[in-house]
Image: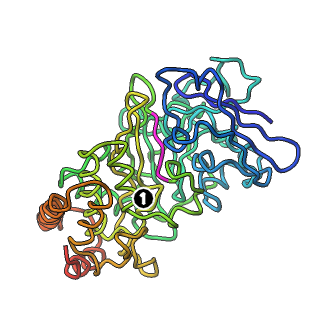
Amino acid sequence: MRLDVLLHDTVVGTLTLHHGNKTTFRFEPSYLAMADRPVLGRWFEDHLDEHWEYFYPQSRLPPFFQNYLPEEGSALRTLIARRAGVKPHRELELLSVLGEDLPGAIVVRSDDVASGAESGDDRPADAALDDSAPLRFSLAGIQLKFSVMRNDDRFTLPASGKGGHWIVKLPDNRFPFVPLNEHAMLTWAKACGIDVPEFELTSVADLEGLPPELSFREPYALAIRRYDRTPTGRIHQEDFAQVLDVTPAEKYERWSYNNLARVIRSVCGEQDAAEFIRRLVFTLLSGNSDAHLKNWSLVYPDGRRARLSPAYDLVCTVAYPGTDPRFALNLSRTKHYTDVTTNHFERLAAKSGMDPENARTLVESSAATIRDRFRTLRDELGLTRETLETLDLHLSKMRL
């Protein structure tokens, strides 16, 4: 099996499943020869002289491409695989099903599809998905979410599997009120001046084309406009698991927020590094223990220069009993909320090529703004009384 990998209509390489247990990814010489080639990923840019061969079991993809798939064990991956008649662990086959609407500007298609030819069915893009049609989009992660079209006030899963400019996140039957929680965190973050996509709550009952086998105990979903889709085309992106060439299973391991800051300072510049610090302060004060590698991304608006993406997946996880009370990645050698002071950010800044004193000032001003906005918005966020009380207690213990 062989798949072409395209970026903004440029063939950048091929994924090939060989006989036996070997999957390879190889760049096209014509792509490597381009003077201003679009960037597929930071890791590749640093290793373009290497011959990419991965000796994983034949069902596995290289880590960069694994990160385009819904995560193993997730409801979305199971649903997509069942609809497509593919085993969930056969990653190359899953990627071939989903390849026309992956995150960012990448397209993956079988090499027997002519360049520029359309794949999939010929139904209108805004037609609703029927009950048995394969799901042909991929949104990485664990949460059940779909790429959808918007018509006036209604959202529709597109039958073609392409063209969705919004993401709808559905209720989680394990944890109560996740869409309401995330809506509140996005509202709070936006009030603090953090760049977030357009978002709104919508009724699950108003979503057209949802797979009928899904059922939910709660009425609300969260709709978020995709920042990687614009009226003029796609914007390429990669999450930090891709940037650092680790698998989704390793999204909590090995790397730290200090590492992320150093990469952002190096490839995006001082302004984005400062924005990363502000968001990290918000992450800690809002009790978000799930800001792992896949919940931070780079975007490439011009195809080449990386910028920090808008913030996403903002959830107050400390509101849910039984979840890990530590935050996702190490910050200057700690994962414990009550350990963190401005000193930890000064060390992060020093390791990342930023001025530690400027970082201290930024953290202090950011924390003051975040706390002030919470006091102002607290009773308007739509959070449950239990969540508000948990947040109050969390903030009272924080030393920022």
Q: Which residue is mark 1?
A: 219
- Find numbered disc 1 in the image and state the secondary structure of the residue it sits on: loop
- 38 or 318: nearer the viewer: 38
The residue at 80%/50% (across/down) is: 58
Q: In this rendering, is residue 74 above or below 3?
A: below
Residue 133 seen anywhere in this rendered image of the structure: no
Residue 333 is one of the magenta-drawn residues: no
Residue 328 horizontal/vertical position (percent): 43, 68
Q: In this rendering, is residue 305 above or below 277?
A: above
User: Where does the C terminus fall, quadrant-wise?
Assistant: bottom left
Residue 266 horizontal/vertical position (percent): 35, 46
* Left or right, residue 273 beside residue 376: right
User: Where does the N terminus fall, quadrant-wise?
Assistant: top right
Q: Residue furthest right?
A: 19
The residue at 24%/52% (across/down) is: 274
Residue 294 horizontal/vertical position (percent): 48, 55
- 162 or 261: nearer the viewer: 261
Residue 209 seen anywhere in this rendered image of the structure: yes
Q: In this rendering, is residue 158 above or below 220?
A: above
Q: What predominant SS class does the magenta segment belong to?
A: strand
The colour scheme is rainbow
Residue 238 is one of the magenta-drawn residues: yes
Please provide the residue range marked out in magenta.
236-240
Q: Quadrant of residue 325?
A: bottom left
The residue at 24%/56% (across/down) is: 189
* Left or right, residue 86 beside residue 144: right
